[in-house]
Amino acid sequence: MLTSATTGAIAAALAKAQGAIRNPHKDANNPYFKSKYAPLDTVVEAIRGAMAASELAYVQSVTCAGNRVSVVTRVLHSSGEWLETDPLAADAKDASPQAVGSATTYLRRYSLMAAVGLAPTDEDDDGEASSVRPTPIEPSRKPSPRIPPTSDARKQDIAVRLGRAGVATDQIPARIGEWLGVPVVKGMEFSETQWCECNAKLFEMDLNK
């Protein structure tokens, strides 16, 4: 918290105001948690009279960077003294005006309540309105595709063409796996797509001889 050089007058005024302020009425509903909370306008209404009677006022500054929202509240006294809260920040669901506005209202309410000494009740869960609710992602359970047997003619063609390139017979499966980016099963069985990729590599190799 930041303060003016002296705080005697504002401390006395704030103590007087806090003695008169009562927790605001919770008249807004959170549909997600089925709970009630006091919205910003109700908080302002609850503190306005007591603060004015103690010659106190407040200002709030809002800073946005993408969907990151930050709010600072400064309480002012007629003596010129002031108290300022530390920045209160949160990430909105996204950078849309609606999401940023929701996060701003939420942060303004909590920052103001903290500045004047009000405490949210256990039932207060309005912050959920400006937060992201992740959706669980089920792991993929796609069945492994059945790889049809590769014809003996194709296997022979691969062996001959790689042999001409100087690749030893026992190294052929490893070379094919390198091309396809997957382990080659015993017996050099390929799917049709894998065979096409392999044949393209062989053709390219033949051209570069």
Image (cartoon, rainbow, N blue to C red):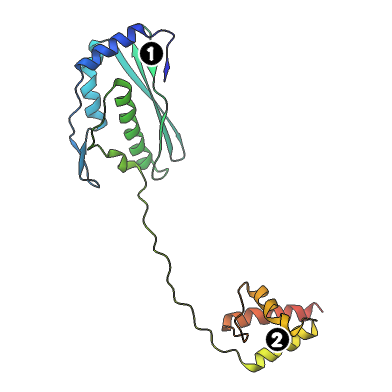
Q: Amino acid at mark 2?
A: Ile
Q: Is residue 207 visible?
A: yes
Residue 13 spot, x, y in % from top left: 28, 10
Q: Earlier in the sequence, mark 2 or mark 1?
A: 1
In this view of the protein, can residue 78 be seen by the observer?
no
Residue that appears at 23% across and 36% down: 122
Looking at the figure, which quarter contains the C terminus? bottom right
Q: Label 2: which residue?
A: 158
Please name the residue shown 18% across and 33% down the image.
Answer: 26
Q: What's the residue type where badge 1 is placed?
A: Trp
Instruction: Tell me residue 105's x, y (percent).
Output: 32, 33
Question: Label 2's element?
Answer: helix
- Residue 185 image position (x, y, % from top left): 59, 81
Q: Residues within 10 Å of mark 2 (few under 14, many from 20)?
A: some
**Residue that appears at 77% across and 85% down:** 163
Q: Which residue is mark 1?
A: 82
Above or below 93: residue 197: below
Q: Label 2 vs label 1: CA separation?
A: 82 Å
The residue closer to the viewer here, 179 or 57, is 179
Label 1 residue SS: strand
